[in-house]
Image: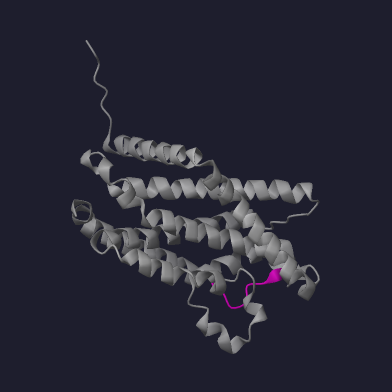
């Protein structure tokens, strides 16, 4: 007689998340060009920006090598935008799976954003290997704080992506608004500049952006001499917790209506 294995709700939920995670890996690796471009695109952008900035600061930007100054900006901003984009489409993408009562939208959101997190760590590892081969000397004074900052950026992107994913179930045109709102982030999140490059009277126009705080703090944790002028760990924490709380509340209120539309 077959033995029935009983599993807790948590075990079932973890298995569902893992299954969707494997599904995402399979679909991503089947598109070899898309996967290659995800790794090559940041490297091209880093190279171009370093070549543009190098003549102005002689290879050193506010006491840290220009190449690593640009790396932190490009990787964090692209990570945020990539996770936001994938998470914002996660609910609609896996809608057929919700016919199974064990599968809920939050499983899809976590699995897809989790894949983006691992993908970005793979990119960082690849960049570290390239830096070693090119005889650059990367320095990370406080690796734990750098990793914590990356995790906060992931939570910000996951939270905002969840809000857009829920909203797009009711109003599909929200995706167009998202594209318009996220485009300026490339220019106002400190990829190519530091707050130290900008007159202090203009800081309030940029300081509202928690992603800018994350980029500048990551640079500071890697190179303490860089400083953390104009940015705040407290503000980044409050923004992350506040957005995450809002996303969870909205999800709890509306997920059933969202998947039934």
Indicate left or right for 105 with 28 as reference: left
In the rendered view, does 49 fall on the left or right side of 250? right
Snapshot quadrant of residue 170: bottom left
Residue 246 location (% of width, % of height):
32, 65
Q: Is residue 112 left or right of residue 138?
A: left
Residue 180: percent from left, percent from top? 42, 71
Along the horizontal axis of the image, is 135 left or right of 141? right
Residue 232 falls inside the magenta stretch: yes
Q: How is the image coloured?
A: one colour
Q: What's drawn in magenta, residue-wise?
A: 226-233
Locate the C terminus by quadrant.
bottom left
Q: Report if residue 153 is visible in the image.
A: no
Q: Which residue appears at 37% of the width and 70% of the height?
A: 177
The residue at the point 64 percent across, 65 percent down is 219
Can you say whether 203 is above or below 63 in the image? below
Q: Residue furthest bottom?
A: 201
Q: Residue at x 69, y 58 (%)?
A: 141
Q: Nearer the viewer, residue 181 or 132?
A: 181
Q: State the residue at coordinates (62%, 77%).
A: 195
Rendered view: 187 above or below 218: below
């Amino acid at each position: 007689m077959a033995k029935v294995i009983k599993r807790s709700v948590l075990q079932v939920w973890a298995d569902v998340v893992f299954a969707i995670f494997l599904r995402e890996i399979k679909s991503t690796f089947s598109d070899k060009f898309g996967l290659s471009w995800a790794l090559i695109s940041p490297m091209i952008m880093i190279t171009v920006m370093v070549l543009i900035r190098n003549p102005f600061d002689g290879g050193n930007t506010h006491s840290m090598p220009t190449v690593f100054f640009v790396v932190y900006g490009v990787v964090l901003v692209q990570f945020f935008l990539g996770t936001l984009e994938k998470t914002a489409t996660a609910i609609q993408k896996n809608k057929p799976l919700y016919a199974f009562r064990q599968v809920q939208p939050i499983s899809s959101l976590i699995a897809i954003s989790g894949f983006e997190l691992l993908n970005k760590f793979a990119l960082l590892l690849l960049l570290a290997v390239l830096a070693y081969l090119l005889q650059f000397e990367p320095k990370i004074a406080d690796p734990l704080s750098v990793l914590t900052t990356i995790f906060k950026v992931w939570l910000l992107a996951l939270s905002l992506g969840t809000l857009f994913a829920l909203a797009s179930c009711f109003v599909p045109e929200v995706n167009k608004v998202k594209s318009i709102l996220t485009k300026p982030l490339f220019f106002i999140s400190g990829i190519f500049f530091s707050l130290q490059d900008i007159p202090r009277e203009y800081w309030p126009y940029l300081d509202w952006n928690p992603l800018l705080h994350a980029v500048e703090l990551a640079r500071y944790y890697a190179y303490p001499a860089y400083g953390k002028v104009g940015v705040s760990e407290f503000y980044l924490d409050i923004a992350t917790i506040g957005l995450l709380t809002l996303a969870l509340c909205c999800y709890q209120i509306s997920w059933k209506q969202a998947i039934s539309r």
